[in-house]
Image (cartoon, rainbow, N blue to C red):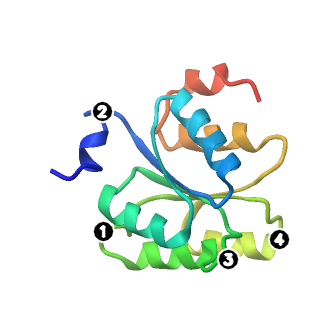
Amino acid sequence: MSLIAGMRSINQRMALVIEDSTTRALHLQALLEQVGLKVLLARGSQEGLQIAQRARPDVVVLDLEMPKMSGSQICLWLKDMRETVSIPLIIFTRCDNYKVAALDIQLDAVDYIPKDAFAYRALLETLRSMDLIAPRTVDRYQS
């Protein structure tokens, strides 16, 4: 068994966060762990693709604006690889360009969440609607 596969308890859901901002990544990790998810962090696109292939998380939360490879390119790669094609993707980004949002939905992203005052609550609602977290965990979260 690989080290990554052994890091998750039997019924615990796993999220991969691909985010180049250390502060934002750690904040997302704390939030998602608070609601019961196991969280893997990737600081860049290549690292994120490798972790997704090995760990096969239940969901990937990724930023669009990344150095070297954009979130849209990561979506294409993840949806093109046999190991990751079925992993749901959530775009969580500062980019508020609705043309880009439409493209990412076409790329099979489950949701597009702009980083604003309601972003964390919206992310939790999306995860709840995917049955990755319990409804009561969303109600307990104070944004």
Q: Classify 132 as above or below 106.
A: above
**What amino acid is at disc 4?**
Asn
Q: Classify 11 as above or below 113.
A: above
Quote the CA–CA distance across marks 1 and 3.
23 Å
What quarter of the picture does the C terminus occupy?
A: top right
Horizontal and vertical percent for residue 132?
Answer: 46, 39
Q: Is residue 130 visible?
A: yes
Please report contact status of discs 3 and 4: CB closer than 8 Å, yes or no: no
Horizontal and vertical percent for residue 3?
Answer: 25, 49
The residue that appears at 66% across and 75% down in the rendered structure is 67
**What amino acid is at disc 2?**
Asn
The residue that appears at 46% across and 78% down in the rendered structure is 77
Q: Classify 119 as above or below 94.
A: above
Q: Secondary structure at mark 4?
A: loop
**What amino acid is at disc 1?**
Glu
Q: Earlier in the sequence, mark 1 or mark 3?
A: 1
Residue that badge 4 annotates: 97
Q: Which mark is residue 103?
A: 3
